[in-house]
Image (cartoon, rainbow, N blue to C red):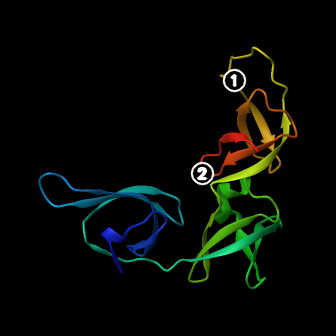
């Protein structure tokens, strides 16, 4: 158990027998009336986002989430196989749990696998990853019809918008939270 004063981003709460991850929180002290905590919560299993307000100091039940450093090995078709870096034990994770993280994972890259009571909840990736552009059209100088960007496919098969000057074979940094181009690596 914890109070709403102890909330942190990434913390997992157990509300109505469901697991919710804290995406954002804000302590609000209005000029009149009691303080409260405004939160944005994400359902760990369904991915649904909700806004919830708690009175300040109210006790909330926290879920024990085991976060382990693991290495992504390969995809066997239906599951993604991860290896625990401490025990070398291999763990299959379903494609539904991996979700959009598959767009940024290369074989032998590290990720944090969050588990609760033996079940994998979600995969946490670094804020940005370096990927190589495998295909993009050559950019035409002076073509500003699409605000100076063009589609590009990276080595994981993910397609995103990149600046016109990028060419095939260039390594780029991609934000794993938004899926957007950051800069050249």
Q: Nearer the viewer, residue 178 or 119?
A: 178
| Residue 158 circle label | none
Crowding around mark 1 (Cα neighbors within 10 Å: few <14, some 14 to 19, many 20+) is some
Splitting the image into 4 quarters, where does residue 28 fall?
Answer: bottom left
Mark found first going from the N terminus, 2 or 1: 1
Which residue is pictured at 24% across the width and 66% down the height?
A: 56
Task: Work out whether 135 lies above or below 130.
Answer: above
Please tell me whether residue 170 is drawn above or below residue 54 in the rendered image: above
The residue identified by callout 2 is: 177
Measured along the vertical axis of the image, is residue 71 above or below residue 103? Answer: below
Q: Find residue 148 and name its label.
A: 1
Q: Which residue is drawn at 75% across and 50% down?
A: 130
- Callout 2 environment at 10 Å: few (<14), some (14 to 19), or many (20+)? few
Q: Is mark 1 on a helix, strand or loop?
A: loop
Q: Nearer the viewer, residue 181 or 46?
A: 181
Q: Is mark 2 on a helix, strand or loop?
A: loop
The x, y position of residue 5, in whole percent, is 31, 69
Q: Do the residues labelled 2 and 1 touch (CB within 8 Å)?
A: no
- Asked which quadrant contains residue 150, the reply is top right
Point out the image quarter for the N terminus: bottom left
Q: Which residue lies furthest to the front in this view?
A: 185
Residue 9, percent from left and from top: 46, 62
Identify the residue at the far left of this view: 32
Q: How many marks?
A: 2
Residue nearest the viewer, comparing 80 with 140? 140
Residue 110 at what x, y percent from top left? 73, 66
Looking at the image, residue 179 lies above or below residue 63? above
- 12 or 96, which lies in front? 12
Can you give x and y, in whole percent of width and height, for residue 159 in the image?
74, 41
């Amino acid at each position: 158990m914890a109070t709403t004063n102890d909330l942190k981003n990434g913390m997992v709460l157990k509300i109505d027998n469901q697991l919710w991850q804290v995406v954002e929180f804000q302590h609000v002290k209005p000029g009149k009336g009691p303080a409260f905590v405004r939160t944005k919560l994400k359902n760990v299993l369904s991915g649904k986002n909700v806004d919830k307000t708690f009175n300040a100091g109210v006790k909330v039940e926290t879920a024990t989430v085991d976060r382990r450093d693991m290495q992504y090995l390969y995809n066997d078709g239906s599951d993604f196989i991860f290896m625990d870096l401490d025990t070398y034990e291999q763990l299959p994770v379903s494609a539904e749990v991996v979700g959009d993280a598959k767009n940024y994972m290369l074989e032998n890259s590290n990720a944090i696998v969050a588990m609760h009571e033996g079940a994998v909840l979600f995969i946490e990736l670094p804020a940005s990853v370096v990927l190589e552009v495998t295909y993009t059209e050559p950019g035409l100088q002076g073509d500003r019809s699409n605000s100076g960007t063009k589609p590009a496919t990276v080595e994981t098969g993910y397609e995103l918008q990149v600046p016109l000057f990028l060419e095939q074979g260039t390594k780029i940094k991609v934000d794993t939270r938004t899926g957007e181009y950051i800069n050249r690596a």
